[in-house]
Image (cartoon, rainbow, N blue to C red):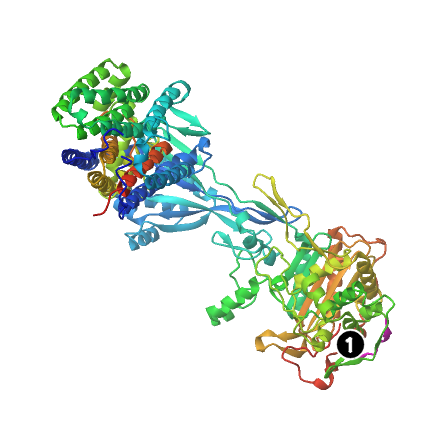
Amino acid sequence: MRNKKVKKRFGISMKNTLAVIMFALSASMIAMLVRVYYVSEVKGETYARRVLSQQSYVSNPILYRRGDITDRNGTSLAVNVKVYNLAVSPKTILNDADNKEFTIQTIADTFQIDRAQIETEIAAHPESQYLILKKDMFEDEIAPFKEIEKQAKENFRKKKKGEKVPVISGTWFEEKYKRRYPLGATACDVIGFVSGEHGTTGIESYYDSELTGSYGREYGYYNSELELQRTVKPAIDGNTIISSIDSNVQAIVEKKIKKLGKSMGAENIAVIMMDPNNGEIIAMASDKSFDLNNPDSLEGYYTKEELAAIGDSEKDAKRNELWKNFCVNNMYEPGSTFKTFTVAAALDEKAAATNTTYVCEGEMQVSDRTIGCANRIQHGTVTPREALMQSCNCALMRMAFSLGGDSFYKYVNQIYGFGIKTGIDLTGEERGITHNKDKIGIVELATSCFGQTQSVTMIQMASAFCSLINGGYYYEPHVVREIKTSGGSLVYKNHGNMVRQTVTTQTSNYIKNWLWDTVKEGTAKPAAVEGYDIGGKTGTGETRNHDSGGETSEKDYIVSFMGFAPVDEPQVVIYVLIDRPQVEDQAHSTYATEFAHDIMKETFPFLGIYNNNPNSGEAPDDSGSDDADDNNGSDGNGSDGKPNDDGSGDGSDG
Amino acid sequence: MKSGRKKVKQQSYYDYSMLILVIFIVAFGLVMVYSASSYTAQTKQEYNYDAAYFLKKQTWAVLLGIFAMLIVSKFDYRLLIRPIGHLKIRLVTCLYLLSIVLQIVVLFTGKELNGSKRWLNIAGMGFQPSEITKIAVILYTSYLIYKAPRAMNKGLGVMRVFIFMLVPIMAVAIENFSTALVIGVIMAGICFVSSKKKWFYGIAALLCTGIGGLFIVLGGAYRVERFEIWRNIETHEKGHQIRQGMYAIASGGMFGTGLGQSMQKLGFIPEAFNDMIFTIICEELGLFGAIAVVSMFLILIWRIFIIAVNAPDLFGGLICAGVLIHIALQVILNICVVTNFVPATGVSLPFISYGGTSVSILLAEMGLVLSVSNRIESR
């Protein structure tokens, strides 16, 4: 470079010049602030007035419509109705002397509210900007008021100088959508309800993000020619959900539950009906139903006097109990219906063959205790088929022993999916409690093979059972079939999500036929409906009172029936459960079996399952139950006597 | 200069306070761009009804700019005036030539927006070459003076710099008079700092005002109209944008209507997020907000001034002087325009107005200043 020796510095005079420039520029900036002050303060008054005159400005949110919920046939389960609240600003009304009289009078006239009452309410909140005078009005109720308001505005615009024309001021309507459930309490557990803007239970909660749309906004202002300019960002409505529930079938099921609840009574009665070919829930109900349009009401459960007497926390507890979906949120020991799973596992693992025989002596010594068969009946020599048909505990235990603990718990915990969530699209699903194969002894194996000492949910039982009779395919249970946009285009369709193969098709066929035999000749006879080929298994399980330290009560039972129809191509699985029926001797699965019979008889026509022999009338003896072979062997607890903490000692049967 | 710095480098300085201040200003700018643009963006189909449309684009430009700023600040700014390899050409010369080429290219192939061809499309991104010209002129002017500082005391030497700079400035002026004016003033400012003959600039300024006046009078109806609008801002039909801007300032009062609460941005002020963004700041944050914004710029130019007077050499000092003038000038001009103190012309508020090229280049300029600060030796 040319000037290597001279170090070129930013010299002192340059620094001074730059300082001058900087101060000049800074001074200019500050001068500009003075200019801003001038515009905002000195001219402010004039300009601000002009701004107001040009802006009769609106910026309103536009409501979205929450998506509807329909059943599989398109019947509305949840819809929205637009309602309006009349809101006023007491402060504005009181300070606007010119219009106060006119505003209050118009409100009083059009909404039939007492004038004095309005005035007291407004006077009571003189500083308030927001007061609701009347709620939940429909569009035609507010139309006259809007008309008067518009007319007054028109007159005001046309008025001559100096003339006084009152307008309505300080009032507006809030519009909102109100969620209505046309069928009231029907399918309340599945549909769920909305509090505020979001769903709290059921489909409303699980699919909340689908059902919720997004707000739009409307902007408007008067331009310099005083024309109203409007721009609208439209709201996006929520998606429509098409549930797999059949509201007819659901209604019948609920009617039957109510009837049984009245005639017999029970702690819980619950029913699931599902399509074994894709996992769709057709009906799901329990006796703890509530009106979706009024979910807080407890009127059906308490009298007015009782309601006045009990405290809020008790009311809340009761509400939470009602809002629970028994089929998904509660667990219990299933009892003998579980035997089907053990037999299927043993067949599948070749631990038992169709012609293997087991000897039943009415009881069996396992480790340090004696576990009894149903009513200590000695079934003699039985095959697996007969073990199912007679619900023989001893044969089942022997089968489980030859299957072995490892295999058995692989089936229970992994293949059938007990102890894990089924993934049903409802909130708060319970996992159930099953034994961990590393920590259990032979007694637990012996009792859990016929459904005691482990807790499951109804949906786990029904879903796994579907796979036993449909050829071995486990479908994820679900209550939603399709999701569509408000415009009707398909967003999502559940064709049935096959999760895994549980048993082989051959095993499935054996189980199907044996369960058919169970209904034809075995313990489940009362379930038979004339003209239909029905298969099924009964169950009587001892239940434990979860509130009192988990002790299994010897007198409290859950009776149940799990069945399907028609046998050759199953289209529906039904699982009914009666928890602690209020009868002297609870241990009769007949209650459940007959109950299932009633439901099947009435719902099958709706499901397109047709009578093989339409001309045959009512079978004369279709309710002729045979209680004898259905008794429970709880007294077979033998020498042990006192129940274990985990309740493992109890054999039971149905 | 490359032989001059063989000494062991002492602990060097880095002006973190300025870095943080700059990042704070651009972040504030993003908030204001979102506030001012979301309405326009979400109501127009061309912006996909996406309220954050402008915010997203601006955020990318800011991130790119901050990245550039950090990279540039870590390099020695003197690399610009060292010959590249064995070639005789220097980076600063390349930049100078590039800016002229781009400016000519834009005249022929540029995208027309609002009646002026100011945009080049490079890889799908719009890009304003006049912003490059700003930085090129700052650097090349500084370089020319650095090469012959004493010549600045003679009329001829100053003329030489002017002539070199006239080329890019004229190229910009064809389509964008206000930017050319800004660039011209920056160039003159740098010369003024380095020259001892101050009276010369007085004459030059008078001359320019004269020529400028002629330019306006002879410049056709377009410029005369601008003057008409300026004088009758409250009645002239084309004064809509400025008038609405002043309404916005007036609505703000002392503390403003609150962030996001501007009404004037709702369709009254067209493109409120561009040059008019200061009025939205005034409306939403009030006079208080305006004082805060101007104070941030005052502190910023104070920091640049400190770096300039401590700069290790003439080149660095002049770069800082140029950047200082650039930022201060745009702030002043922008506020002048939106308060109708001068006739309307398109000058954006540095770091805050929407405009990707502008904010990226400004951040790169700050990188240069930081690079100069990095060469200050602590004593």
The residue at the point 58 percent across, 45 percent down is A240
Residue A191, quarter of the rendered image: bottom right
- Tell me residue A232's x, y (percent): 44, 35
For the residue pair A175 and A272, the one nearer the viewer reads as A272
> Residue sitting at 34 percent across and 43 percent down?
B27
Is residue A129 visible to the viewer in this orientation of the structure? yes
Q: Position of residue A590 (x, y in %)?
A: 75, 70
Q: Nearer the viewer, residue A209 or A354?
A: A354
Q: Is residue B133 left or right of residue A635?
A: left
Name which quarter of the figure residue A654 lies in.
Answer: bottom right
In which quadrant is the N terminus of chain A drawn?
A: top left
Task: State the extent of the magenta-drawn residues as a range.
Answer: A373-382
| Disc 1: CA contacts within 10 A as few (<14), some (14-19) or many (>=20) | many
Given the image, on which type of amino acid does mark 1 rest?
Answer: Ala
**Element type at mark 1:** helix
Find residue B292 and report its horizontal and vertical position in percent: 24, 43
Please name the residue that numbered disc 1 is placed on.
Answer: A374
Image vertical order of residue A281 relative to residue B267, above or below = below
Residue A430: percent from left, percent from top: 60, 64
User: In the image, is residue A379 part of the stretch drawn in magenta?
Assistant: yes
Is A581 or A139 nearer to us in this picture?
A581
Residue A472 painted magenta: no
